[in-house]
Amino acid sequence: MPPAHRVTTRIEFRAHAIIPLALFEAIRALDLPTNDGLEEFHDELVVKRLGMNRTVVAQIRRYGGLARADKRVDGEEVVALLRLVARRADFGLVYAQAGRRAARMAAARVSGVLRLLRHLLPAGFGMLLARRAAADAFGVALHGDGATVAASMDDTIAVRATPDGAACGFFGSALAELLRIFTPFDGALLHVACRGRGDGECHWRAGPPEEE
């Protein structure tokens, strides 16, 4: 359970287009063939690997346009995509890579002036930027001052996609990357409470890298 003294901030979440864009880009990046000398098998892989499907290319183009226009998408689109990823054997890797990609996209949406000021102002300003990006792009409330970081998510989008909470890995990865971008954070975010495990909300807290 989250600490009793913490005040929960409920955030109305509308999925930004960077979420499906990052997921599709991660799928494609992981499924592209490498220069391994096995070119004769790559035609067969094109059929078997989702990321090499033309539909994925089209979806990247579509969501890329929506992301550049700063648009939101229907949450059920994101639920369906997170659920699709969960069917893969490497779903954890996809969620982790996509989360990092989405965080970098979310950070890029912060104005250049504010990103510059982050290096000139106290560390708390970077935490403010991370908090705003987390709430706006991922519907997550960040708490703390950089040294004692915690996060909570009221929205059920992850467990609607994966009842066991597997898709929470995407959001945890995104939050950790946002903290690394905007603050001196250099650790892991541990998923200490999850709706998929019967808790009232998803909750993360900072921990050392080796605990991840």
Image (tube, rainbow, N blue to C red):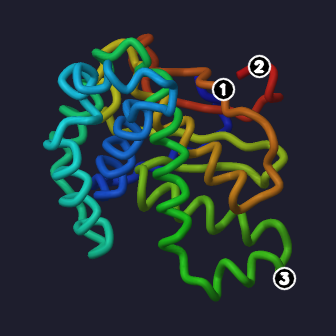
Q: Secondary structure at mark 1?
A: strand
Three-letter code for the amino acid on which mark 3 is drawn: Leu
Determine the residue positioned at 36% across, 35% down.
27
Image quadrant where one finds the N terminus: top right
Cα distance between the residues tagged 2 and 1: 8 Å
Inspect this view and state whether residue 160 appears.
no
Q: Nearer the viewer, mark 2 or mark 1?
A: 2
The kind of residue on which mark 2 rests is: Glu
- The crowd level at tag 1 (other Cα within 10 Å; few <14, some 14-19, many 20+) is some
Whether residue 113 is visible to the viewer of this picture, yes or no, is: yes
Instruction: Give the CA distance from mark 1 to mark 3.
Output: 30 Å
The answer to the question of whether label 3 and label 2 lie on touching residues, with beta carbons closer than 8 A, is no
Q: Are marks 2 and 1 in contact (CB under 8 Å)?
A: yes
**Horizontal and vertical percent for residue 38?**
42, 21
Image marks 1 and 3: residues in contact by CB distance under 8 Å: no
14 vs 179, left or right, is left
Give the x, y percent position of residue 81: 23, 34
Residue placed under numbered mark 3 in the picture: 120
Q: Earlier in the sequence, mark 2 or mark 1?
A: 1
Q: Residue at x 26, y 35 (%)?
A: 52
**Picture coordinates of residue 46, whole percent (x, y):** 23, 28
Image quarter of the C terminus: top right
Q: Position of residue 186 (x, y in %)?
A: 81, 43
Q: Residue at x 18, y 24 (%)?
A: 47
Residue pointed to by mark 1 = 190
Tell me if residue 93 comes above or below residue 69 in the rendering. above
Q: Which residue is mark 2?
A: 211
Picture layout, residue 24 above or below residue 194: below
Calculate the distance from the C-alpha at mark 3 to the C-alpha at mark 2: 32 Å
Identify residue type, mark 1: Leu
Residue 198: numbered disc: none
